[in-house]
Amino acid sequence: MSLTTSLATALAEGSLKIVDLTNTLSAETPTLRLPEPFPNLIDFRLEEVAAYNESGPFWKHHNIHTGEHIGTHIDAPVHWASGKEGKDVSQIEPERLIGPAAVLDVSAAVAQNADFLLEVEHVKAWEAEHGPLPANGWLLLRTGWDKYADDKEAFLNADESGSHTPGISSACAKWLAEETELSGYGVETVGIDQGNAAELDPPFPAHYFLLGSDKYGITSLQNLDKLPATGAILVVAPLPIVGGTGSPARVYALLDS
């Protein structure tokens, strides 16, 4: 039996399960809010064009208005200054968008400290238990933050000192970018960096190091608690936008039932 036939059979029989890791996309989806004087992307909205009426008696369809980095989305290298000579979304090879998932659970630490930063020592401790990070794989940081995904205020968790959401340290971002063969890094928060990452050195180190090293970010993931530490396959499906710095994406995991 071929591999593709085996895959189709496993899906049909239910021995291979699909877990949807994508937040729904609507005008209510929490989005990044940059401070002044920086302009923000527009939120997602639908514009009705026809709805079984004079504009279209047999059909209904909409125009879509959205920023690239809205909801569950991918960051392409060209999104950041360090990757400005790199790939746009349409140029990311499909084989880089499918790969093994390594799920690192720090939700207990985040429950005690919303400003938690992932360090190299955390990743090495995970590797000591589960083996090395997979080549062409994705490191998925489970923080428990997806529980706030339908609450804009809680999701951004902002006060007068900034946005308090977990992320990754500069040293760890550099290490993942330069010392691993990962395709990318995924998070449950609104962006791949910590909420107050502008204060790190360099600012927004996940963007700086990962995108500058032809690695990709995915954000606003859901249901990472349904995945094992190893054994799942991640599938990331963005729109192939020519010149696009990012795209809303449908993200799935395949795993044994």
Image (spheres, helix red, strand yellow):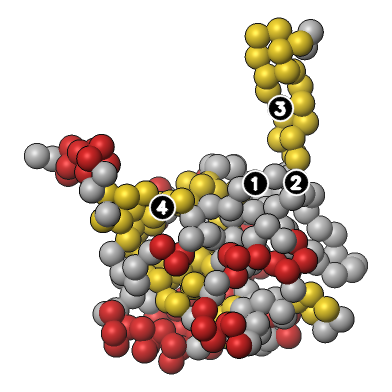
Q: Earlier in the sequence, mark 4 or mark 1?
A: 4
Q: Earlier in the sequence, mark 1 or mark 3?
A: 1
Please state the horizontal and vertical placement of residue 111, each as a whole percent of the image: 59, 82
Secondary structure under badge 2? Answer: loop
Amino acid type for the residue under numbered disc 4: Val
Q: Residue at x 85, y 65 (%)?
A: 38
Name the residue nearer the viewer: 36 or 17: 17
Q: CA distance from mark 3 to mark 4?
A: 28 Å
Q: Earlier in the sequence, mark 3 or mark 4?
A: 4
The residue sitting at the right extreme is 37
Q: CA distance from mark 1 to mark 3?
A: 14 Å
Q: How many marks?
A: 4
Q: Earlier in the sequence, mark 4 or mark 2?
A: 4
How crowded pointer 1 is (Cα within 10 Å; few <14, some 14-19, many 20+) is rated as: some
Amino acid type for the residue under numbered disc 1: Leu
Q: Quadrant of residue 46?
A: top right
Q: Residue at x 40, y 71 (%)?
A: 103
- Contact flag, marks 3 and 4 (Cβ < 8 Å): no
Q: Residue at x 60, y 88 (%)?
A: 112
> Which residue corresponds to mark 1?
25
Foreground mark, 3 or 2, reads: 2
> Which residue corresponds to mark 3?
62
35 left or right of 44 in image: right
Q: CA distance from mark 3 to mark 2?
A: 14 Å
User: Mark on residue 16?
Assistant: none
Q: Residue 7, can we see it?
A: no
> Which residue corresponds to mark 2?
27
Secondary structure under badge 3? Answer: strand
> Which residue corresponds to mark 4?
19
18 left or right of 241 in image: left
